[in-house]
Amino acid sequence: MLCDNVIYFDCRNSAIHDKEMNTLKDNYQTLFKWRSKLGLNEWSIYLELISPHQVKYNVDVPNEDRYFIGIEIRPRNKIGVIYHDVDLYEQAIVHELLHVKYFGKGEDWINEKTKELLKQ
Ligand SMILES: [Zn+2]
């Protein structure tokens, strides 16, 4: 039996921030809106709140950078899980979905593309 390939992106060092914090319902609405816009409707994407204690940081990481947002992607089963230990917001959700759509691309490229899409 073939194993499912898992691609994992750790986005904690990306410039992800936004003033608007959302509720979980808002987050799923935003997620569904962008999943559709990006043509990813055949994907199942889940949001998973994790405890900050589950994330290890190097001692040199300043406190304000000690948050985690990342995505685990299972292309074979078309599943994505967005892990986060801070509130989510549109910019972060779009960023993570772009990892699904363009999983060969690096953080800088994804950041640029996120900005571009949100400007429209
Ligand atoms: Zn990222």
Image (spheres, rainbow, N blue to C red):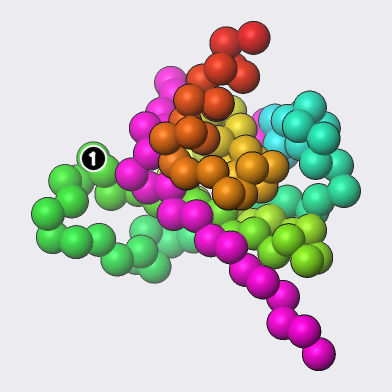
- Image position, residue 40 (x, y; %): 80, 41
Q: Which residue is denoted by mark 1 in the rendering?
A: 64
Left or right, 98 with respect to 54, comes to right
Location of the C terminus (image quadrant)? top right
Residue, far bottom = 1
Residue at the image point whose x is 76% and y is 36% from the top: 35
Q: From this view, report whether residue 76 is shown above or below residue 60.
A: below
Q: Is residue 32 visible?
A: no
Residue at the image point whose x is 44% and y is 41% from the top: 107
Residue at the image point whose x is 13% and y is 60% from the top: 59
For this rendering, which residue is in front, 35 or 100? Answer: 100
Residue at the image point whose x is 55% and y is 26% from the top: 113
Residue, far right = 42
Secondary structure, magenta segment, majority class:
loop
Q: Which portion, as a residue range, is magenta? A: 1-27
Q: Secondary structure at mark 1?
A: helix
